[in-house]
Amino acid sequence: MTVGYLGRVGKSLIGRTTRTTVIAAVCSLLMTVLLGASEGATPSVGIVKMAEGTAVVQRGDQTLAASAGLALQEGDVLRTGADGRLGVVLRDDTRVSLGPETEIRIDRFLFAPAQGQLALVLKMARGVAAYVSGKIAKLSPDAVHVETPVAIVGVRGTHFVAKVESP
Amino acid sequence: MLLLAACAAPKPPPPPAPTPSLFVLLPDPSGAGQITITNPSGTQVLTQSRQASAVPGPTGAPGPPFVLADAQIQQIFGATLAALPPEPAHFILYFKGDSDDLTPESQALLPKFLQTVRDRSPADISIVGHTDTLGDREYNYRLGLRRANRVADLLVVQGVDRSTLDITSHGKNDLLVPTGDQVSEPRNRRVEIIVR
């Protein structure tokens, strides 16, 4: 009877351990998937390649010092001071540079060509900037524009510079 | 005296005319470019390189195109242009059939590829794996991803942070050389890398 009882306890213990292991494995897998998913929730839209002098990236209420390698997100505001310059490249190969006293917001960036989702809107509040089109402009020129306080610039696969005086 | 002073009081100076904003189309390596400058008062289209339009303000129509000399472009925009990052570098590495092993020819290209990654560091790098049309979509999606991850491994060994790499697979859906289905084509068995 004791042997039988121990046998039954032994079986249920093994069963429980196995179940615990399986549950632990599933939880850990779920955590990995969830964490992975949350990391992917703020995808990078580009990267700072060059920063000189006073140059920052404003993200919500955070102000980050811009430096080469900083990953950019949709909604970021790029800003330079009197001695500042910034060079950035976006995921679709669009290149933008900012001269001194310049502010540009990456208002919208959508690059999923397989799903036909393409959009690039830059809001240039003031200053001096250079722009070279990437794939979004080449695949869908109407999907790209640069908004300034004085005019909106529509872009067709191209390179231009702008000096915007804020009114 | 006071009256005279009052009569002689200077009128306030007129407000200065706002400085116009300037938009200039520049030469584009990939061919003819075009920008359209629009506000509620008008539209201007620039189609020739070095053409510029001045916009007096939010309510002034964009001015007619005029050509800016190189020296003027350099003076206003030179420092800003110099801060533009270089054009992204593209690489294609090829693989043996049904494998994530590089062909010998692509193995030989590795030093140059890795040197470019080092030279451009910190870089934003996209790695897209592809296959030919042998096999089904699901199999080739996975094979393409294995190939892309193999290239990512090479970069990680060089010290690149894997979390900064954009690694994807287009499987058999994005052929470099169009073929029918179930066709072996070495030039489609590839990984395309863009180093920004």
Image (cartoon, helix red, strand yellow):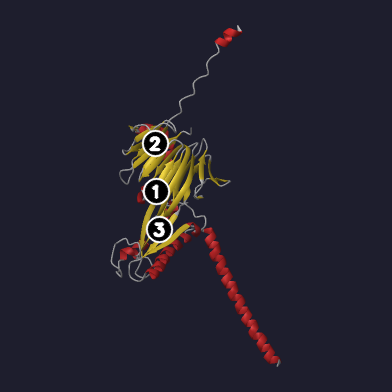
Q: Amino acid at mark 2?
A: Phe
Residue A38 rendering spot, x and y as whole percentages: 54, 59
> In which chain is the residue bearing label 3?
A
Q: Quadrant of residue B8?
A: top right
Q: Which mark is residue B17?
A: none
Name the residue tied to disc 2. Answer: B23
Q: Are marks 3 and 2 on the same chain?
A: no
Numbered disc 3: secondary structure: helix
Q: Are marks 3 and 2 in contact (CB under 8 Å)?
A: no
Q: CA distance from mark 1 to mark 2?
A: 19 Å
Residue A129 rendering spot, x and y as whole percentages: 44, 39
Q: Are marks 3 and 1 in contact (CB under 8 Å)?
A: no
> In which chain is the residue bearing label 2?
B
> In which chain is the residue bearing label 1?
A
Looking at the image, the residue that sits furthest to the right is: A2
Name the residue tied to disc 3. Answer: A115
Name the residue tied to disc 1. Answer: A143
Q: Residue at x 46, y 46 (%)?
A: A88
Vertical placement of A66 versus B173: above or below? above
Q: Residues within 10 Å of mark 2 (few under 14, many from 20)?
A: many
Q: Amino acid at mark 3?
A: Gln
